[in-house]
Image (spheres, rainbow, N blue to C red):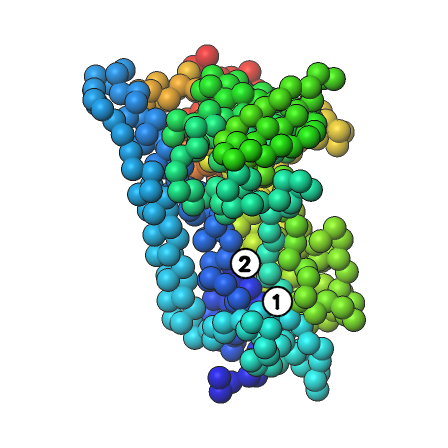
Amino acid sequence: MSTTQFDVIVIGGGPGGYVAAIRAGQLGLKVAVVEAAQLGGICLNWGCIPTKALLRASEINHMLHNLGEFGFAADNVRFDFAKVVKRSRNVSAQLSAGVAHLLKKHKVTVINGFGRLAGTAGGQRKVSVSVDGRETATLTAPSVVVATGARARVLPGLEPDGKLVWSYREAMVPTELPRSLLVIGSGAIGVEFASFYRNMGAEVTIVEVADRILPVEDAEISAFARKALEKQGMKILTGAKLGAIRKGDNAVTIDVTVGGKTQQVTVERVISAVGIVGNVENIGLEGTAIEVDRTHIKVDPYCRTGEKGVYAIGDIAGAPWLAHKASHEGVMVAEQIAGRSVHPINPLNIPGCTYCRPQVASVGMTEEKAKAAGHKLRVGRFPFIGNGKAIAMGEPEGMVKTIFDDATGELLGAHMIGPEVTEMIQGYVIARTGELTDAELKETIFPHPTISETMHEAVLAAYDGALHI
């Protein structure tokens, strides 16, 4: 490599890192990205993208087995599970190649290897690059962006073994469909895998230590989701504590205690989805002013660390652990480095999405948190059963919930469950970002017939004006 001096070095080529590099390149900076594995990071290769490809396949499987109400019949429906998995891997490979093309287009130098902070020299930050433990290069730049991401948290006794106990990686590339599985954890990752495998025909049990599934979501939406998933045949155990774990040749038995009563759950496979830990090890944080809190780098609202010239973005910088949050941080940091004026990210304006069936999406405060913050509320609810398009599509299961401040009309939060709500939540995100109130939202004209009309009705419902229920 001929060039070792850059304007900015990005350690990690995931959705935060590669976007930061592209934006910095667009702004005329000389940029290097150091990536030890695949461009696109966990999100593109082992997370957001391949799981959506798998979930799409499972939705098709569900549809093919439920064609009767539409007047169709499909006999002897079957699937090739290996091809389902292969397609998801091909989708990831295609997009990873696309990231490489974009970086090249914007004249970003991509360096394969493991990057770590290596001190300073003449006022410049140094980054060492190694491959298989052997140093291959030393790069310098006045600014460094740490975007090393995170990995699955591992519970003692439930370490992924490649056969019986899976992390998200093993769960995405199984050689065959298990007949039964236990999903430990009911956040977005756990519920999405549960939805995929249940729709493909597996018997699924979800175990959650909290008192409800999807615990970061509004309690009313969580309850709706639980009923919907149980209606599909899932077994859900909340307020649960794991006990003894016994592995057989092709099965796992786990003691699960709920309400003081212990039961044995025996399944072919276990998926552990109990959160993530930041990749802070061996990246040169020692001897710097960078602080780490519970495996995540502490940053200010502008993603600046305690070490001058070093930024941290994405999962390594803490919650919420979302690819779109990482990408937005990447743009913000790149523009700062280029000398532009930027605004810090408001966490309450970051949407959350879970792509199970039915989908879940939200932005802003839950009703519980809004009350705790001292707001007097106006809450609107509208069910999909009152929406013509949802009924025509055969998708009447869902609801939209809006939460407004009674005094100011501010939209404090919006929560949705139903088909394609992950595509619609951006409407409420725009409303919060633009600081729209109930007055503007009530006057907004939504196209008919669309499922998005439920969003308007839920606003009207908060002010006793819903029209179709």
What SS does tag 1 mark?
Answer: strand
Image vertical order of residue 451 relative to residue 42, above or below: above
| Residue 77 percent coordinates (x, y) | 25, 26
- The mark nearer the N terminus, 1 or 2, is 2
Query: The residue under label 2 is which amino acid type?
Result: Gly
| Residue 443 percent coordinates (x, y) | 47, 30
Residue 61, picture quadrant: top left
What SS does tag 2 mark?
Answer: loop
| Residue 257 percent coordinates (x, y) | 69, 22
Say which residue label 2 marks: 16
Say which residue label 1 marks: 145
In the image, 386: left or right of 221? left
At horizontal 52% and vertical 35% (from top left) the residue drawn is: 249
Query: The residue under label 1 is which amino acid type?
Result: Val
In the rendered picture of this protein, how many numbered marks are placed on residues?
Answer: 2
Q: Nearer the viewer, residue 11 or 206?
A: 206
Q: Residues within 10 Å of mark 1 (few under 14, many from 20)?
A: many
Image vertical order of residue 235 relative to residue 297, above or below: above
Residue 103, picture quadrant: bottom left
At horizontal 71% and vertical 80% (from top left) the residue drawn is: 120
Q: Is residue 246 visible?
A: yes
At horizontal 73% and vertical 71% (from top left) the residue drawn is: 308
Q: Nearer the viewer, residue 289 or 26?
A: 289
| Residue 343 percent coordinates (x, y) | 62, 56
In the image, 161: left or right of 59? right
- In three-dimensional space, the C-alpha distance between marks 1 and 2, rounded to whole angstroms, equals 9 Å
In the image, 413: left or right of 250? right
Residue 95, picture quadrant: bottom left
Q: Is residue 341 visible?
A: no
